[in-house]
Amino acid sequence: MIREEGLAARLWRFAIWAAVAVFVLNVVAVIAVVVIDSFAARWFGTWLPPAFVTHWYSDAWNDFQLSDILIVTFEIVAAVVVISGVLGVTAAYAMARRNFPGKQAVMLIFLAPLLVPPLTYGIPLATLLYKAGLGGTMGGVILANLVPTVPFMVLVMIPFIEQIDPRIEAAARVFGASTFSLFIRVLVPLLLPGVLAGLLLVMVRTIAMFELTFLISGPTSQTLVVALYYAVFASGVRAGQEVDVMAVVYMISTLIWLLIALRFVSPTQIVSRTKQRA
């Protein structure tokens, strides 16, 4: 009986690791195909392209105006990150330190944009922004992206704030610290790792946000992910390698910020702190 249980456990572990290996290989294979094709002169029916070139990157940069798209993307992302940081940290502090009627309802409202598919509230939100004259503008794209990013920042920051002993703040007030001094000199140094982690995750989330940006953006307010979507439909006009170039640029820009975010905090760390709070 013991041998049978040991054999079953080994088979189960083997099945899990095999499934993980298949998943990783599929992801790596998809990425590798896109990267290789972005350097291929042509690629039909062979394991590898017969020749490699680099001009697709310059062609895509000029044909799709990637410089303008990247500038717009980083302007929108920077604005979303700053506003989400200011609103998210202050709201998270209030949620972590204050008890008030309807607190659970407010928390549910914060959770809703993260749990509901973006298209569910994106279409009425887009209708409202277009009626307000913000459709197709960078301001409209920024406002639309704030709907999920501010609650995300709040939920990330609450565990970081709750782990700070309230007696530290009380002691600072006893020694005459004002609210501004308390925030700048006491809370900011303690919360800085969490704030940086939250802001970097918001940045990655905003770069990858397609649905809301697609519904609101116009020709001059497209982010990289939306421009990539339109580039896919231009594959009959543009070379397929140029589309792959845009995909590579998108993957690299997202991966860089994601690696920086993981440098400051890991997802398991956030989950463990949330469990401790609960």
Image (cartoon, rainbow, N blue to C red):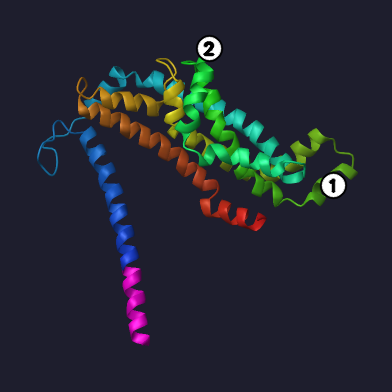
Front one among 7 and 113: 113
**Is 8 in the magenta?**
yes
SS class of the residue under badge 1?
helix
Quarter of the figure with residue 93: top right
- Whole-percent x, y for residue 5 in the image: 36, 81
Q: In the rendered view, does 112 fall on the left or right side of 39?
A: right
Q: Which mark is residue 170?
A: 1
Quarter of the figure with residue 225: top left
Q: Residue at x 84, y 44 (%)?
A: 172
- Whole-percent x, y for residue 191 in the image: 67, 44
- Whole-percent x, y for residue 65 in the image: 34, 18
SS class of the residue under badge 2?
loop
The amino acid at mark 1 is Ala
Q: Residue at x 61, y 28 (%)?
A: 83
Q: Evaluate whether residue 200 shows in this view.
A: no
Q: Residue at x 50, y 47 (%)?
A: 262
**Is 2 in the magenta?**
yes
Magenta segment boundaries in residue numbering: 1-14
Quarter of the figure with residue 10: bottom left
The amino acid at mark 2 is Gly
Q: Residue at x 20, y 24 (%)?
A: 239
Front one among 239 and 13: 13
Q: Which mark is residue 101?
A: none
Q: Evaluate whether residue 90 shows in this view.
A: yes
Q: Which mark is residue 133?
A: 2
